[in-house]
Amino acid sequence: MEATRQMTDSEALHEEATRRTAGPEPAHTEATRQTAEPGEPHEEAKGRTTEPEAPRNRRVLVALLIWLSIAAGFTVVQVRQSLHDGWLAAPPTYDDIAYFVDAQSRLDTWSTAGTRQMISDALSDPPHSPWSTGVAAVAFMVAGPQEWAPAALNGVLVLGLLLLLAWRGRDLPIGWLLVIGAFLLTWPITGQAVVNSRPDIACGLVTAVTALVVATSPWVGAGRRWHYLAGAGLGVALLIKPTVSPVTLAVVLTAMAATTATDVVQGHPWRRWRPIAGAWGRCLAVALAIALPYYAVAHRNVIDYVRRNTFGELAEVWRLDLGLAEHARYYLTGTGGRFMLDAWLYLWLGLAVATLVVAVARRDAPALGRLPAAVAVFVVSYALVTVPAHKNQFLGALLPSLMLVSAMQMMLYLARVIRGTSATRLRYAGAVALSSLTLAGLVLVRPPASFAPWHPMPLDTISEHRALLDDVRQDIEDGGAGPAHVVFTNIGPYLNPPLLEFRSEPERGRELHAVDLAMSTDPNDLEIQLDVATDVLVFTQDNPSALQWVPAAADQQRVLDRLTDHPAYYLSSVHGTPGGGELFLFRPARSFSGIVELDGFGPIEGPYPELGLTDPVRWGLGPMSRFEIEVPPSGDMQLVLTAAPGVPGQTMTVMASGDLVAEHTFGSPGEFDDVVVDLELAPGRHTVELHYRDWLPPSETDARPLAVLFRALLASSTGGA
């Protein structure tokens, strides 16, 4: 039969698998007898004899070393270039940094508390992406917590792509495979797969491979191994990025349904429901075995994440306000398309047209018969990533992944057609055409976009961001003893909680824990954090180094005013930010606590190391300072203060609820006295007054009546002692 003689690897049926699973060979069609399992070219059809085991093993080993060397070399080039002036030159940003911190935290638990505790933590707090956290953890185990280490390990994705090419094209000479492999390596998405540590590209590639190989190969009678492999691909894709599992399932199930329908339409005897159910059952059983353990413990997190970001309170934050046409082309020629595809979209279109023309001209019924299933996969994938208004450059990675994998399949198909052409001139012309496509890719190739096209940045600005991050980190680590609880009232791409935690140095003696309020819409969230914070970071309004699309961005001036006027907080330092603007670091004055200020106090200020004042201070203003205290049921309170007079011989009288409690006379200005006053008051709220005999007269530099400089003023219960 002509269709049988023209049958390609991806269109082969499965005589060998049928013999293993169904017993004696059925005498249905000549095509059934002369074809092989998907992905395994039939030896007799190519006129070859079975190769001895030892030489074949050596040949496989040599091929493996070749592909491993190419993948390693490509990865090294990508990482070195990116470290010099690309993505990796800047501090790691979202979402990469979140996985780095997660991985490092789990490794720290493993090293300090052991494997059992690490597993317990994973069950109670499963990783957002087992793939990205796992890659970062393995990379850090090998190279330490280096920012480039996960990118180096991402080379396994490139190796996997090349090994897939070698497997699907193992009936072709190595020269053809090298030409096709070189073309695949020129695609922007291939380079991005290395330098980006988000799970989107890895998930897109595994989903694309699984869906397209299933869609373009016979399915129902393919044999158990084929179904198990497809199930493994689906299960792994579900683990790589669980939050897009609905899309992953929809695309792979579409491929399975379409290829099953193709088998039935083509009239194969396996159209009875039992073989169909068996093929689907085997595939889904393997997928469940791989993915179910994770979803059993993480399903609530996954569902809640999807709900909040797609339908809930954060849906509007992620929604892109685009027109219908802009939405339609976002992942093709829009922002997402330029990031992952660029000019390779047009190379792919040309390749697709050429492949279709060749298949039609050759009347290749098997290839054309599988085309609707492949088209169905593309249509469903395009709709699933394009229809939602929630878009970014990574979320649609499935679409360029499908184009990349299908480009490989189409080039393999054309290579086989060219090799099988008897006319020498046509064979040479075809080889030149295929090589020219690779040459075009090499001419167009460029390094992965630095920081992504939506945020280009020169190297000197990168240095400024790194310097700012290090300055803030050192400022916080030097700011006191004990754990630091840092509150970000807004975040920047290169200054945010996970990045600060990742770059912290616990060996300096201070552990950092940071909280992100960028997505908060409730002012009370800040007030709650102010009760426990050791450091609060506030950007100036419209700061170019901060995110401007998050809810907190519009509220920075109000937050800045709130911290400036807060009675228990003082401005510790100010940092200039790249592109203009400032970053303010506020700290609580823990030495002023237990009181509710009423009047007669200046703001908390300092410290002033040049004056010997290493702690924040505040002035008591003449003639009187007033505050309230809350006396516990025991009725025992103590007022503790450390202060220096503004004028020599200052006398301070302490009154509580109108009664004289104590009186203290200070010495010379600059000499601090420690004063402890025991208060015996009824439970409840009481007003305390500090009366000053004298104060400094107003001056040109400070018009306030400065009476006493407080370094500490605390009211606390004595516990009935």
Image: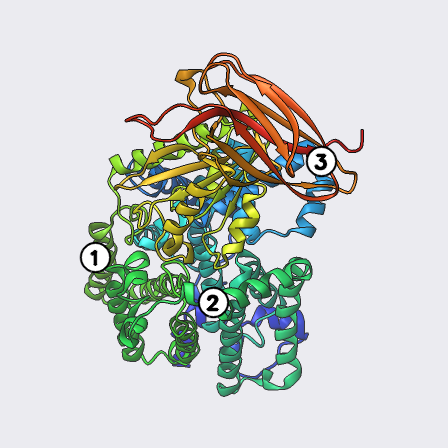
Residue 604 visible, this angle: yes
Marks 3 and 2 sit apart, C-alpha to C-alpha, by: 42 Å
On residue 213, the disc is 2
Residue type at mark 2? Val
- The residue tagged 3 is 114
Percent coordinates x, y for residue 636 in the rendering:
75, 34
Marks 1 and 2 sit apart, C-alpha to C-alpha, by: 26 Å
Neighbourhood count class around disc 2 (C-alpha, 10 Å): few under 14, some 14–19, many 20 upward:
many
Q: Is residue 79 above or below residue 241?
A: above
Q: Nearer the viewer, residue 256 or 525?
A: 525
Q: Is residue 405 above or below residue 174?
A: below
Residue at image x 37%, y 61%?
392
Tell which tag, 1 or 3, sits nearer the viewer: 3
On residue 672, the disc is none
Percent coordinates x, y for residue 283 in the rendering:
61, 69
Q: Secondary structure at mark 2?
A: helix
Q: Nearer the viewer, residue 529 or 161?
A: 529
Marks 1 and 3 sit apart, C-alpha to C-alpha, by: 56 Å
Residue type at mark 3? Gly
Indicate which disc, 1 or 3, sits on the residue closer to the N terminus. 3
Percent coordinates x, y for residue 183 in the rendering:
30, 54
In this picture, residue 413 sits left or right of residue 640: left
Neighbourhood count class around disc 1 (C-alpha, 10 Å): few under 14, some 14–19, many 20 upward:
some
From the image, which quarter does the C terminus lie in?
top right
- Asked if marks 1 and 3 touch (Cβ < 8 Å), the reply is no
- How are the colours assigned in the image? rainbow
Neighbourhood count class around disc 3 (C-alpha, 10 Å): few under 14, some 14–19, many 20 upward:
few
In this picture, residue 84 sits left or right of residue 60: left
Q: Nearer the viewer, residue 476 or 647?
A: 647
- The residue tagged 1 is 436
